[in-house]
Image (tube, rainbow, N blue to C red):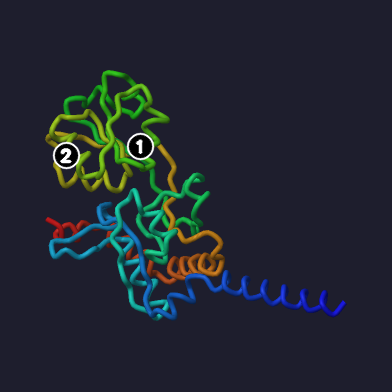
Amino acid sequence: MKKLVMMFVVLTIALTLTAGSVLAGALDDIQKRGKLRVGMEPGYMPFELTNKKGEIIGFDVDMADRMAKAMGVELELVSTAWDGIIPALLTDKFDILMSGMTLTQQRNMSINFAQPYIVIGQSVLVAKKFEGTVNDYRDLNDPKYTVGSKLGTTGEQAVKRMIGNAKYISYETEQEGVLELINGKIDAFIYDMPYNAIAFVQRGTDKIYHLGQPFTYEPLAWAVKKGDVDFLNWLDNFMFQIKNDGTYEKIFKKWFESDAWLKEIQ
C-alpha cells in the first residue's frame, strides 16, 4: 500500500511539473529573455518590407513594436524565407509569426492563430492589352491565359482552385511575379489585394490594370506554437485593447490610407 501511495505521489508531482512547463509557454521565455522575437518575410507591402536603409518596416512591424512595448521588452525582427517560416516557428527560431499570413484550416493543423487582425482577399493584376476583355477573375479560366502567383501562398491555391483551366506559373517572390507581368511573360498575376493595389500604383497604369475587388475571403492572423493558450489569450486581449484605444486605427491609417511611406522605399 505504501508503495502504491508513493508511486501516486511521484506521478502526481511529475504531471504537475509537466503541466507547469507546458503552461509556462512563450510569455515566460520572452520575459526572461527581455526580448520579443518576431518572424516575418520582409517582402509583402505594406505589411513588412525593407526601406532604403535596409531596415524592415511596415504595418506588422509597427504592431510588433507596440506589442513589445506592452510587454516591457525589446523587439527583435527575424527575417525568414516564406517557405520555411512555419518550420522556423516550430523550431523556436522566434516567438511569434507576424507576416501577413492567412489563417487557413491546413495551417491551423500545425500552428495556432490568434484572432484575425485584418481581412483581405485575392485580386488580379492584368496586362493592359486585355483591358475590356478580362473584366473578372473568371474570364482568366481559359487555357489561352497564363496566370502567375507566389509559391506556397493562398494566391496560388486560389488560382488552382478557381482558375484551374489557365496555365499557371509560380514565383519565389511577389516582386518577380509583377515584373514578369509587366514584361509580358504572363497575362495576369493573382495576389493579396493590398499588395496588388500598391504594386499597381508603383508601376503605373501604362502596362497593367487592377481588378481590385477581392474574390476570396482571407483573414490574416498572427501565429504561435500549438497549445500556448496563455500567449493566445494575451494576444487577443492586446488586440482588444489597441482596437479600442485608437492605436490600431492610427497604424492602419499610416499604412493603408497614406502613401507617405512609399518615399522610404523609392
Q: Quadrant of the C terminus?
A: bottom left
Question: At 21% from the left edge and 25% from the top edge, which residue is drawn?
Answer: 130
Q: Nearer the viewer, residue 247 or 53?
A: 53
The vertical placement of 111 against 32, above or below, is: above
Question: At 33% from the left edge and 61% from the top edge, which residue is drawn?
Answer: 60
Q: Amino acid at mark 1?
A: Glu
Res 150 → quadrant? top left
Count all numbered tags in the image, as a single digit.
2
Q: Amino acid at mark 2?
A: Leu
Question: At 47% from the left edge and 69% from the top edge, which residue is drawn?
Answer: 238
Q: Nearer the viewer, residue 23 or 241?
A: 23
Q: Is residue 48 left or right of residue 222?
A: left
Task: Name the element at disc 1.
Answer: helix
Q: Position of residue 162 (x, y in %)?
A: 41, 29
Q: Nearer the viewer, residue 185 or 124?
A: 185
Q: Is residue 153 left or right of residue 52?
A: right
Q: Is residue 24 left or right of residue 215?
A: right
Q: Position of residue 258 (x, y in %)?
A: 24, 58
Count neighbours of disc 1 (C-alpha within 10 A) and say few if under 14, some if 14 to 19, many if 20 or more.
Answer: many
Label disc, if present, on residue 221 of the rendered structure: none
Residue pushed farthest front? 3
The vertical placement of 180 against 232, above or below, is: above
Count neighbours of disc 2 (C-alpha within 10 A) and say few if under 14, some if 14 to 19, many if 20 or more.
Answer: some
Residue underneath mark 1: 156
Residue underneath mark 2: 179
Q: Position of residue 120 (x, y in %)?
A: 39, 47
Q: Position of residue 62 (x, y in %)?
A: 31, 67
Task: Name the element at disc 2.
Answer: helix
